[in-house]
Each structure stands twice: as C-alpha cells, then as structure tokens.
Image (cartoon, grey):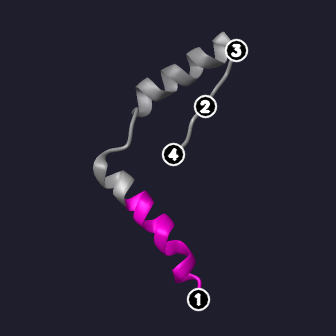
Amino acid sequence: MGAAVTSDPDLHAALHDHRNLHGTIPGPMEVFLVLSSAVSTPASGR
C-alpha cells in the first residue's frame, strides 16, 4: 500500500490506466491483514 505522485501527465495517465486495470483500493480484510502483520512483525523476530 502506498501512493504515487507525479506532475508528468503521461506518467499520470499510465498509472491511472494501471490502477483501472488491476484494481483500486484494498478491501477491509486486506487492510486488516496488513495492519495486524505490521504490529506483530517485530514480535515474530525474537
């Protein structure tokens, strides 16, 4: 998960097309899994 920022109109169009073809936002379960793994990652390295 993240963000992409550009002032280049061609790159913006390419990123927009990619997002439209491959999905836009994560669902609630994906967000839950990312957040729960981020919290537990340091503890699992012991």
Main SS of residues in magenta: helix
Q: Would you call the spot at circle 2 few (<14 residues within 10 Å), some (14-19), or many (20 or more)?
A: few
Residue 15 is drawn in which quadrant? top right
Q: Amino acid at mark 4?
A: Met
Q: Would you call the spot at circle 3 few (<14 residues within 10 Å), some (14-19), or many (20 or more)?
A: few
Q: Amino acid at mark 2?
A: Ala
Q: Residue furthest top?
A: 9
CA distance for labels 2 and 1: 34 Å
- Magenta-colored span: 33-46
Q: Amino acid at mark 3?
A: Asp
* In-image side of 12 versus 29 (left or right): right
As rendered, which of 24 and 42 lies closer to the eye?
Answer: 42
Residue located at (45% from left, 67% from top): 37
Is disc 2 in contact with disc 3, using a CB cutoff of under 8 Å? no
Q: Is residue 21 above or below residue 42?
A: above
Mark closer to the chain start, 1 or 4? 4
Q: Is residue 13 magenta?
A: no
Q: Is residue 14 above or below residue 24?
A: above
Give the number of callouts: 4
CA distance for labels 2 and 3: 12 Å
Question: Which residue in the protein does label 4 denote?
Answer: 1
For residue 46, the mark is 1
Q: Residue furthest right?
A: 8
Question: Which residue in the protein does label 2 denote?
Answer: 4
Q: Is residue 19 above or below residue 41?
A: above
Question: Which residue in the protein does label 3 denote?
Answer: 8
Q: Amino acid at mark 1?
A: Arg
Q: Would you call the spot at circle 4 few (<14 residues within 10 Å), some (14-19), or many (20 or more)?
A: few
